[in-house]
Image (cartoon, grey):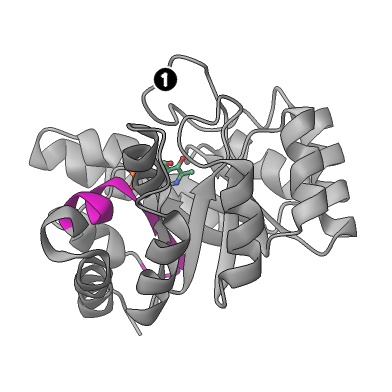
């Protein structure tokens, strides 16, 4: 059965729209946990456009479930992760002008750096997941560098415009899952998942964790974040295999 980590970056986006102190992502995290979330995910970007250092330090103290820190492999951010010591880091690529994370981490190109970051995280007892597209060479590089898990990028699935394209993207995710499991990796998934498109992905056996943000925070504006989290967990439970 797959579980849900709620990505609360966009609670901080609303706060940063006025550079004030509300809404506080720390409060949002507690509400998500009360609704049964498996964990809380935040992305500490180098440009600090939403989540800031205080959020990460405070969430690390207050989150009772799992804190998953999404981050690039830039040295200042890696140092913060070492100091804070979240339960898990998910390594992502990061470009300055992007609206959200685009593409997966290139674990082949950055293999040497990845190897070093994985070692440093493991030294602190932090689980490492790499956010990648479901390509064999990326999965193999994640396994070879010692990653514990991969997060399969579901963005291409979310953007698929036709039934045929949806089926093709689901098949690619399933093939990625098979290869990753052969290599001994835990398999997560995320990006672009919504209340409307979660069912086919939740049905994929063997996916352990979903990281979902924008859709839940968008729903929360209307129904509250505890209810929005509860509704997404209900859908994941309904469609994922036991
Ligand atoms: N997983 C990763 C690695 C991401 O970078 C993001 C976006 O921050 C998400 C999941 C969540 O994506 P969305 O906000 O589209 O649900």
Question: Residue 73, image x and y in percent?
Answer: 71, 32
Taking the image as shown, residue 190 lies to the left or right of residue 219, namely right
The quadrant of the image that shows the C terminus is: bottom left
- Residue at far bottom of view: 242
Question: 68 or 203, which lies in front?
Answer: 68
Question: Residue 207, image x and y in percent?
Answer: 44, 65
Question: 95 or 188, which lies in front?
Answer: 95
Question: Residue 137, image x and y in percent?
Answer: 62, 34
Question: Residue under circle 1?
Answer: 98
| Relative vertical location of residue 17 with respect to residue 216 in this rendering, above or below | above
Q: Residue at x 77, y 36 (%)?
A: 114
Question: Residue 58, image x and y in percent?
Answer: 61, 60
| Relative vertical location of residue 160 with respect to residue 120 in this rendering, above or below | above
Residue 225 within the magenta-colored segment of the rendering: no
| Relative vertical location of residue 23 with respect to residue 162 in this rendering, above or below | below
- Neighbor class of circle 1 (other Cα within 10 Å; few <14, some 14-19, many 20+) is few
The quadrant of the image that shows the N terminus is: bottom left
Range covered by the magenta-colored residues: 205-219
Q: Residue at x 76, y 59 (%)?
A: 85
């Amino acid at each position: 059965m797959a579980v849900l980590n709620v990505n609360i970056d966009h609670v901080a986006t609303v706060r940063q729209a006025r550079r004030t102190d509300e809404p506080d992502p720390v409060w949002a995290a507690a509400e998500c946990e009360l609704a049964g979330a498996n964990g809380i995910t935040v992305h500490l970007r180098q440009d600090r456009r939403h989540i800031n250092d205080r959020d990460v330090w405070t969430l690390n103290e207050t989150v009772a479930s799992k804190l998953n820190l999404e981050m690039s492999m830039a040295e200042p951010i890696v140092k913060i992760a070492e100091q804070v010591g979240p339960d898990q880091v998910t390594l992502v690529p990061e470009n300055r002008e992007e609206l959200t994370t685009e593409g997966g981490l290139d674990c082949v190109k950055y293999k040497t750096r990845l190897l070093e970051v994985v070692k440093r995280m493991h030294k602190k007892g932090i689980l490492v997941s790499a956010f990648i597209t479901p390509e064999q060479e990326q999965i193999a590089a994640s396994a070879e560098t010692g990653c514990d898990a991969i997060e399969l990028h579901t963005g291409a699935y979310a953007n698929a415009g036709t039934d045929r394209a949806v089926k093709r993207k689901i098949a690619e995710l399933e093939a990625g899952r098979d290869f990753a499991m052969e290599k001994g990796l835990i398999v997560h998934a995320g990006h672009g998942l919504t209340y409307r498109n979660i069912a086919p992905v939740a049905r994929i056996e063997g996916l352990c964790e979903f990281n979902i943000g924008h859709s839940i925070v968008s729903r929360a504006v209307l129904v509250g974040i505890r209810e929005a989290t509860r509704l997404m967990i209900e859908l994941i439970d309904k469609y994922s295999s036991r």
